[in-house]
Amino acid sequence: MKKRSAWQYLSGPVLLCIFFLCGCSLITPPNPSVRFAMKYERDAYYREAMLQSGGFSFRTQNFLRSNLFHKLLNEDPAKLVAMLEGMYRAEQSPMMLEILADICFNEAGRSSREDEAVAYYLSAAIYSYQRLFSPAFSREERLGRFDPSSCQQLVCYNASVAKIFEYIRNRELLLNDSYELKDVSGRRIRFDKLKSHLPFPVGSYDNFISCSAFKIQNMTLINRRFGIGVPLVAVAKPDEQYQSLRMPGRLPMPATVVLNLDLTETRESRASFEIYDTFVDETVKIDGAEIPLALDYSTPIAAFSEFLPEDLVEDNLIMAMLRPENMEQKTGLYMLEPYDPGKIPVVFVHGLMSSPDTWNLMMNALRNYPVIRRNYQFWFYRYSSGNPVIISAAVLRDQLYAAEKEFAVTPEAKETVSRMIIVGHSMGGLITRTLMQDNPNYLLEQFSGENWKDLSAKLTDEERKELESVQFHKPGFVSRVVLMAVPHRGSSMAKWSIARFGSNLIRIPSKVVSRSLKFLGTIIRVTNQENELVNEMIYTGIDNLDPDNRFIKVLSGSSFASGVPVHSVIGDIDGRGAPGGTDGIVPYSSSHIDGVASELIVDSGHSVQKSPEAIRELARILRQHLLAARKEGVPLRFAMPQKKSTDTEEK
């Protein structure tokens, strides 16, 4: 465990008091998380999907009673299974497979010996799989879509496969070319090499953990779907897969594993695990039929913080703001899922003293919409909110251009990247506004007092290049902006003495100060301005939120890039849904801007990104974005529903 300095021990309690009104993350409910589930909770994960209680089904109990098999079940369950399998072979009764699966599954749960239990689970999986998919049965004999037995068999199969998978993973057999297990009857099951449809090579994953191993906390909407297979948290190693898109650490991603079984009647059958990327595959083909995969998108999101490195967890957000230099190597674009050239990027920019974790509730809810998770991929910009807004905006600009250069290399990728959306919350909205200038020279001209043409003529080539670094040419690939609780005209709380004290604690990186002084010196030299007039350019991020700060005054007078729809979501703690209120941090008079494509006032405090109304509004905007693309003839990989939409057009 890393040792902490005295400052780290003292800074937490002190600054929690100082910034409880100023930060974007410290005044909200906790972000989603997980804890490791108890054994009974792991078992309940599968039964909960079908509201099924434990124990034998009525059909199995009735069969055991009518044939007086209870005594044999208690004394020698393996002998009973062998007897019933003989009856099945003689009669080829589908019902007997259901009873066999039920007995084996329950016997596995009763066994105290792991090797014996996995043999029963393997038999249960085989019998369930045969009952569901065996070509030996006619179409009339197979379980129908609305037959409740099909659900029971699928639950039995999934829960059994989960136990088998965990057994093999714990013994480090999963990546072997082949290995062997025996079922209750002694039949040898030869497992072939794992088949993977994941975006990265199997060796790029640190672990595959069943979602049932985790118990979700602080999340109301649980985004799961019943189907075949075992939902997993596929934990990718923190390797740099891309140059411009980073992993926050070990990255938990949703996946589903299915156990394929050879149904031949030999004494040595074959099997193989197959893992699917559920961002791409939501069904699997078995015996010519498309079967829905079991899906779980919530557990990997809730487990996100479980796999973060220590220096990126929420406890360090205060230090990340106070010491921007420590964040330099961690600043950049991060992914929550692998890059997909067929999906439109949505870039989320967090606010003051916050992190990408603040979007987790929204991510979970958005993934509940199939049309959104199939057509969009989510990126996050991580930065230190202690830096001046203009510095954070310049870094984001450079990062976005680097991503566009790296990924927009095929016709499909060029089309999707060109429809990028940026969503900014609070200070993140100011960064977004700085980035999306209609006039790229606006900020330079406002601070220098001269138009760029005249100013440029007075500069050396080196000075001109230096000043061009704060020109903000709207990225041509950003086609829509969503702003949430943005203080366009500042917040009066930035004037409070506790906020001023906090600002004084921030240490802007020396190279940022050096570069800013060089920049300011150039302007002073060519314009004869007073030093005090331009010093505000290097004020901290908190200073930039002061309504009297020159930077925010200048920024509030800027125009968004023409042709880019801008949507605004504003919080109102009184829930009136009308102009004139406040979200507790930013008043409506500061967060409102004219000329937007839409404005919605929601019943929320400052963290509107966690509000159900704001989430629904963003979902509406994302659907509207797809509708606009379809009208323009863009061939989407996953088509929008053809039914009439209630979404309105842009103003």
Image (cartoon, rainbow, N blue to C red):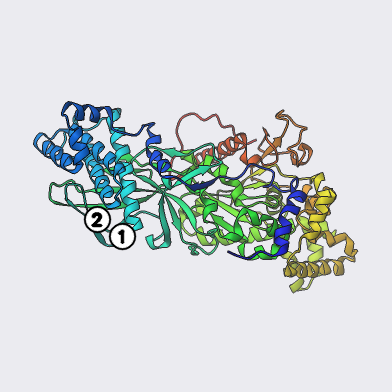
- The residue under label 1 is which amino acid type? Leu
Rendered-image quadrant of the C terminus: top right
Residue shown at the point (82%, 66%) measured from the top left:
520
Instruction: Kindly indicate the quadrant of the structure image that contains residue 292.
Output: top left
Circle 1 Cα neighbour tier, 10 Å, few/some/many (<14 / 14–19 / ≥20): some
Instruction: Kindly indicate the quadrant of the structure image that contains residue 104.
Output: top left
Q: Is residue 158 left or right of residue 411?
A: left
Residue shown at the point (27%, 27%) measured from the top left:
58
Instruction: Kindly indicate the quadrant of the structure image that contains residue 229.
Output: top left
Q: Is residue 83 above or below residue 169?
A: above
Give the CA distance from mark 2 to mark 1: 10 Å
Report the front residue among 86 and 240. Answer: 86
- The residue under label 2 is which amino acid type? Phe
Which label is found at residue 173?
A: 1
Q: Is residue 647 left or right of residue 84?
A: right
Q: Is residue 138 above or below residue 200?
A: above
Residue 391 placement (x, y as % from top left): 71, 60
Residue 400 in view: no
Residue 553 placement (x, y as % from top left): 82, 49
Residue shown at the point (61%, 34%) measured from the top left:
613
